[in-house]
Amino acid sequence: MSPEQRGMIRNKRIYSTIKEIITLFILFACLISVFMIVSRDFLQEQLQTLVEQNSSDPTSSQKIGTRIAVLNRQISDATSVQKDFKKWSALILAINTATTKNIAYTSFHAYGSNLSVEISGTATTRDDLLKLKESLTASGLFLNIDLPLSDLLAKGQNSFHIKATFDKKKQSIIQP
C-alpha cells in the first residue's frame, strides 16, 4: 500500500470515529431531552393536582392558618413570661432562714415590677414576730420592712402582714 492510501484509510477511520462520537452525542442529547420533557409534564400534572386540592378545600388552609396563629400567640405569651422572670429562690431561701418554727405563712407575694414582697401568716407569740422582722432586716436583702403595729397588739397567735422592699443593690441575686 502506498503512503497516500494509508493516509486515506487513516482519515476515513478518524472520520468514522468522529461521526460515531457525534452520533452518540446527538443520541444522548435526544434521550436527555425526552426525559426532561416527561419530567416537566409529570411535575406540571402534580402541580395541577395540588392546586386543585388546595382550591377545592379552603378549610385546610384556614385550619393551618388558625393553628399557626395559636402557636404564635403561645410563643408571644411564653416570651412575655420569660422576659419578666425573676429568680426568687435566693429571696425565698433568705426568708426561710429567717423563719422560726413558731411562724406559719398563709401567703407570699413577690412583685418583680417594684421588687417588693408581701408575706402574711401567723406567729405564735409577739416575740416570734419581732424575731422574724429582725432576721429579715439582718439578712441585708430588704431596705424597708413594714410590720404594722396592729399586728403586734396581740400577745399570742399574732396574724401579720409584712411588706418589704428588696434592696436594688442586691438585685443581681434574683436575676436569671
Image (cartoon, helix red, strand yellow):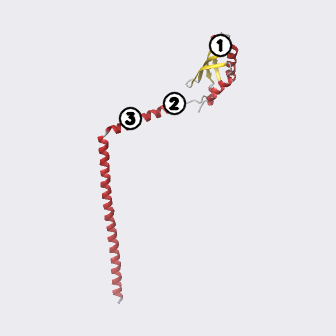
User: Does residue 79 lie above or below 146 as drawn?
Assistant: below
Q: Residue furthest bottom?
A: 1
- Give left or right: position of 18 versus 151: left
Q: Position of residue 30 (x, y in %)?
A: 31, 64
Tell me the amino acid under the disc marked 3.
Thr
Question: What residue is pinned by disc 3?
Answer: 66
Tell me the amino acid under the disc marked 1.
Gln
Secondary structure at numbered mark 3: helix
Give me the disc on residue 81.
Answer: 2
Q: Residue at x 41, y 34 (%)?
A: 69
Q: Position of residue 89 (x, y in %)?
A: 62, 29
Q: Split into 4 quadrants, where in the image is the C terminus?
A: top right
- The foreground one among 170 and 163 is 163
Q: Residue 34: in sight, yes or no?
A: yes
- The foreground one among 89 and 156 is 156
Graded by Cα atoms within 10 Å as few (under 14), some (14 to 19) or many (20 or more), the crowding at tag 2 reads: few
N-term-proximal mark, 3 vs 2: 3
Q: Are marks 3 and 2 in contact (CB under 8 Å)?
A: no
Graded by Cα atoms within 10 Å as few (under 14), some (14 to 19) or many (20 or more), the crowding at tag 3 reads: few
Question: What residue is pinned by disc 1?
Answer: 157
